[in-house]
Image (cartoon, coloured by chain):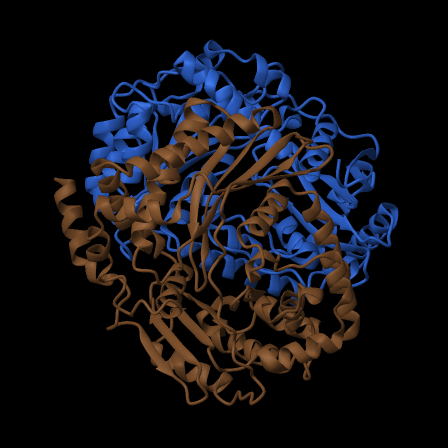
Chain colours: A blue, B brown
């Protein structure tokens, strides 16, 4: 991707990234807040995500009924996402209509109502969202594994929150959360597309400049202590399918080892695609596909991590072959990990991983939305510089680096292994 | 000030929509249609298309055969094995994949522009010379059976299957394209070889190449890869019959143990894409369950009643009859209430149609989102393929605003009355015991 962009910090602390792209008459605007599920205390889990929902419920200038239609009327696409570390809102619009998105985001940074009736209605919507997730055995397994992996660190709960808290969080809790974390000095704005930087910056200054900064609390710092041995858990439920997850402790995205681990991820499980707009690459030649699928230990598998502020997890998920036990599948996985720990990988394998990463960058660059996404997203866990130098950093990874990180991070003693065993029943 | 400048900027690019002057269309001597449009802003290329094979050719006892064949194509050819095929693609960061449909099957791949020939070479080889290695057939069979076991536990999938069974009773669309465990178990390697021999060929084969390549050069590369393909055994595809007409509402629930939520699919058959009232129906559907936060349905079921995270409607017309349906995921206890609310909205929709403001909003939405849908090579390729598939003409997007703006409120209501029958609906659900 091209490096031309402008970064400005307004006097109220709002960081603004602008990137002109004139290939299509489109502009994508993102506002990122440094708040996510990692900032949530026990009893208030899911509050960041619920707050995100409430941001669609209107302000005085943009009442709910107008809000949801105004963007659609102009043909825009818009949405919001909440993660462990951040919450973000975006609009991709025909270029001549982007002003609406800018006005809307400036307004709802401080003026959302959080009407009590809307909170009550949204409570059942979010509980329904969680119930939809709970219909999936893999969600239940992943939630249990994550919970086992993080006893202290707030990464221990799912972004959607625990059902108990979804029943008890109040309107005032939500409003307080909003008032605490939604501030220009706690946000990053990223806009890419068909505009002139000078004009766009002037408009952003006019709309967002008057919003006052405020003191935001320090982010929760509860480091997870070192794990003293492998943790295992087992759960069961209806169906015929056995799932296995093995989750290893992984460093923060800003850690120097992240690059070697990205190459290792590519060799083991196929390249992870960090783009949210733009497809991935198949993994049929990855070491684990050959060891697990071709050897019929599993009928499906994936491996991957997230780019996070604090150390999180790298998780392998296996759909175990009908004729195998989860123990056999895990042994096959272990054998491959052992191989990468014992034997140096070839330089050719690293070169392939780098070419794959380059291709993924090229695919992601087709989308203006994706380019704006990266400017903000990378700032949430590291910096845009992290993104711009990513390929260069990958190219410096050596076979010895791979071996070292494989030995350091893929240790059985620092993993959680979870299995979902089917009880065999299908229909009630 | 800025708005003025941006307006100019947009006007300059109105003709940037794909059209007859920049879509290169060539029919090769063997019948393959090649469509190409350049995008030199992109360092990559998208290759996608469709061909005249699908589950229409399957017998009831071998359902899933088309899917099985498509998935097996890249598992080895007369020239090389699976690891060699995927090794060539993945080492270049390129992709290629096939998936079967009912009337057509599809393929899609992409690569850095410098690797276009690589993708086309693999495409040509796997289409023409698949080996169906027996060990891979059996491995895939195990994967399919596992997939079907997972499907049996998926409330959304099961509600979809039941819905199609009600709406399309006795019609080819009533059958799931991925088959049933017993039909997958019954498929032999010989079935696959025969199916490939009969249904794969250059007749009715369409390919689009979009991205950082000169269109003429793209056509030459397709010609080099696929120009010599012939199949005298390729059979003619059967036509798709009209959907049966439901005379009264049919309600069916599929219970799955251990679930917390019920998925609902409710609706009826819809128009084919080629029907003149398709755009009117599509705009009506937008009012009903798309526009803003999932239209009227979203407003009633999600926003006002708080019953569901998702509740929307969709219209999916293809070569054959489509469906016009509403989907929602709700707590088991709220299932009846949600269904009642949705049916009430359908009644209102048929009786009163849409307001002038609603229609104007949806027209603006359809026109405004067009450039956004075309920002990627994949989006452009999809749009060009649809022009070909549904015989819309290469000027379809250039005339799109005119076609949309010509739709009147009466047209929408006429389409609603014609296709939406609130007293004769298929109402399918899957979740906990009702």
Q: Quadrant of the C terminus of chain A?
A: top right
Q: From what the image shows, is residue B166 above or below residue B262?
A: below
Quarter of the picture holding the N terminus of chain A: bottom left
The front one of A357 and B193 is: B193
Left or right of A291: which side holds A361? Answer: left
In the figure, is residue A328 to the left or right of A124?
A: right
Specify whether residue A66 is in view.
yes
Q: Residue furthest front?
A: B247
Residue placed at 25% from the left, 72% from the top? B20
Q: Position of residue B305 (x, y in %)?
A: 45, 22
Determine which quarter of the picture holds residue B263: top right
Q: Position of residue B39 (x, y in %)?
A: 34, 66
Of the pair A285 and A400, the residue shown nearer to us: A285
Q: Position of residue A86 (x, y in %)?
A: 49, 30
Q: Residue at x 27, y 34 (%)?
A: A70
Residue at left 80%, top 35%?
A: A236
**Does residue A31 appear in this view?**
no
- Foreground pick, B200 / A17: B200
**Rendering coords of residue B61 (x, y %):** 71, 65
Image mark count: 0
Left or right: residue B182 versus residue A166 is right
| Closer to us: A219 or B120 | B120
- In this picture, is A30 found above or below B387? above
């Amino acid at each position: 991707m091209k490096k031309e962009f402008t970064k400005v910090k307004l006097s109220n602390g709002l960081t603004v990234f602008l990137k002109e792209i004139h290939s299509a008459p489109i502009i994508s605007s993102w506002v990122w807040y440094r708040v996510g599920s990692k900032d949530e205390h026990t009893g208030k889990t899911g509050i960041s995500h619920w707050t995100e929902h409430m941001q669609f419920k209107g302000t005085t200038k943009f009442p709910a009924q107008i809000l949801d239609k105004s963007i659609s009327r102009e043909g825009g696409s818009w949405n919001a996402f909440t993660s462990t570390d951040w919450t973000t809102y975006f609009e991709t619009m025909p270029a001549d209509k982007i002003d609406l998105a800018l006005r809307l985001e400036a307004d709802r940074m401080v003026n959302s109502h959080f009407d009590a009736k809307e909170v009550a209605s949204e409570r059942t919507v979010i509980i329904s969202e969680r119930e939809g997730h709970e219909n999936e055995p893999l969600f239940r397994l992943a939630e249990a594994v994550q919970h086992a992996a993080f006893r202290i660190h707030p990464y221990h709960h799912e972004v959607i929150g625990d059902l108990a808290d979804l029943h008890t969080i109040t309107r005032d809790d939500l409003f307080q959360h909003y008032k605490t974390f939604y501030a220009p000095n706690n946000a990053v704005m990223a806009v890419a597309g068909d505009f002139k930087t000078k004009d766009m910056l002037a408009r952003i200054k006019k709309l967002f400049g008057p919003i006052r900064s405020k003191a935001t609390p320090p982010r929760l710092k509860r480091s997870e202590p070192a794990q003293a041995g492998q943790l295992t858990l087992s759960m069961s439920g209806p169906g015929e399918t056995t799932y296995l997850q093995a989750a290893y402790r992984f460093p923060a995205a800003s850690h120097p080892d992240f690059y070697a681990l990205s190459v290792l991820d590519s060799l083991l499980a196929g390249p992870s695609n960090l783009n949210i707009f733009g497809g991935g690459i198949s993994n049929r030649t990855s070491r684990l596909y050959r060891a697990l699928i071709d050897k019929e230990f599993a009928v499906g598998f994936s491996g991957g991590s997230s780019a996070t502020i604090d150390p999180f997890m790298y998780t392998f998920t296996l759909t175990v072959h009908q004729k195998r036990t989860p123990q056999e599948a895990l042994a096959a996985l272990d054998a491959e990990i052992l191989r990468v720990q014992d034997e140096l990988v070839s330089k050719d394998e690293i070169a392939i991983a780098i070419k794959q990463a380059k291709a993924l960058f090229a695919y992601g660059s087709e989308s203006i939305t994706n380019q704006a996404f990266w400017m903000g997203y990378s700032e949430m866990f590291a910096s845009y510089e992290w993104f711009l130098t990513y390929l260069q950093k990958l190219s410096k990874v050596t076979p010895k680096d791979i071996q070292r990180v494989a030995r350091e991070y893929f240790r059985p003693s620092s993993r959680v292994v979870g299995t979902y065993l089917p009880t065999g029943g299908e229909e009630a | 000030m800025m708005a003025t400048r941006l307006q100019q900027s947009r006007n300059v690019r109105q003709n940037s929509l794909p059209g007859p002057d920049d879509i290169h269309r060539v029919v090769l001597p063997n019948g393959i249609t090649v469509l190409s449009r350049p995008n030199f802003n992109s360092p990559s290329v998208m290759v996608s298309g469709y061909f005249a094979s699908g589950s229409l050719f399957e017998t009831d006892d071998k359902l899933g055969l088309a899917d099985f064949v498509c998935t097996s194509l890249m598992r080895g050819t007369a020239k090389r094995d699976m690891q060699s095929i995927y090794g060539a693609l993945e080492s270049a960061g390129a992709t290629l994949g096939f998936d079967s449909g009912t009337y057509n099957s599809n393929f899609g791949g992409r690569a850095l522009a410098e690797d276009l020939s690589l993708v086309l070479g693999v495409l040509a080889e796997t289409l023409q010379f698949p080996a169906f290695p027996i060990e891979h057939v059996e491995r895939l069979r195990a994967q399919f059976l596992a997939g079907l076991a997972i499907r049996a536990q998926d409330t959304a999938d099961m509600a979809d299957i039941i819905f199609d069974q009600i709406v399309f009773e006795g019609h080819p669309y009533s059958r799931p394209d991925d088959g049933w465990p017993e039909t997958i178990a019954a498929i032999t390697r010989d079935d696959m070889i025969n199916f490939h021999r009969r249904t794969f060929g250059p007749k009715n084969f369409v390919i689009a190449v979009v991205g950082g390549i000169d269109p003429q050069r793209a056509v030459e590369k397709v010609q080099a890869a696929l120009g010599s393909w012939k199949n005298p055994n390729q059979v003619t595809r059967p036509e798709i019959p009209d959907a049966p007409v439901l005379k009264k509402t049919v309600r069916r629930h599929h219970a799955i143990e251990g679930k917390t939520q019920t998925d609902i699919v409710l609706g009826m058959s819809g128009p084919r894409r080629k029907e003149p009232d398709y755009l009117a129906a599509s705009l009506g559907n937008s009012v009903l369950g798309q526009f803003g936060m999932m239209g009227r349905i979203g407003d009633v079921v999600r926003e006002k009643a708080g019953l569901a995270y998702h509740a929307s409607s969709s219209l999916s017309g293809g070569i054959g009859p489509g469906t016009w349906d509403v989907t929602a995921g709700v707590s088991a206890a709220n299932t009846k209430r949600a269904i009642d609310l949705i049916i009430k909205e359908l009644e209102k929709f048929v009786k009163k149609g849409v307001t002038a403001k609603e229609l104007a909003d949806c027209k603006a939405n359809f026109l405004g989102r067009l450039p956004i849908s075309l920002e990627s090579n994949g989006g452009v390729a999809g749009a060009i393929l649809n022009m070909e598939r549904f015989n819309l003409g290469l000027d379809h997007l250039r005339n799109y605003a005119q076609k949309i703006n010509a739709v009147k409120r009466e047209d929408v209501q006429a389409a609603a009355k014609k296709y939406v029958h609130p007293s004769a609906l298929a109402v399918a659900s899957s979740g906990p015991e009702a």
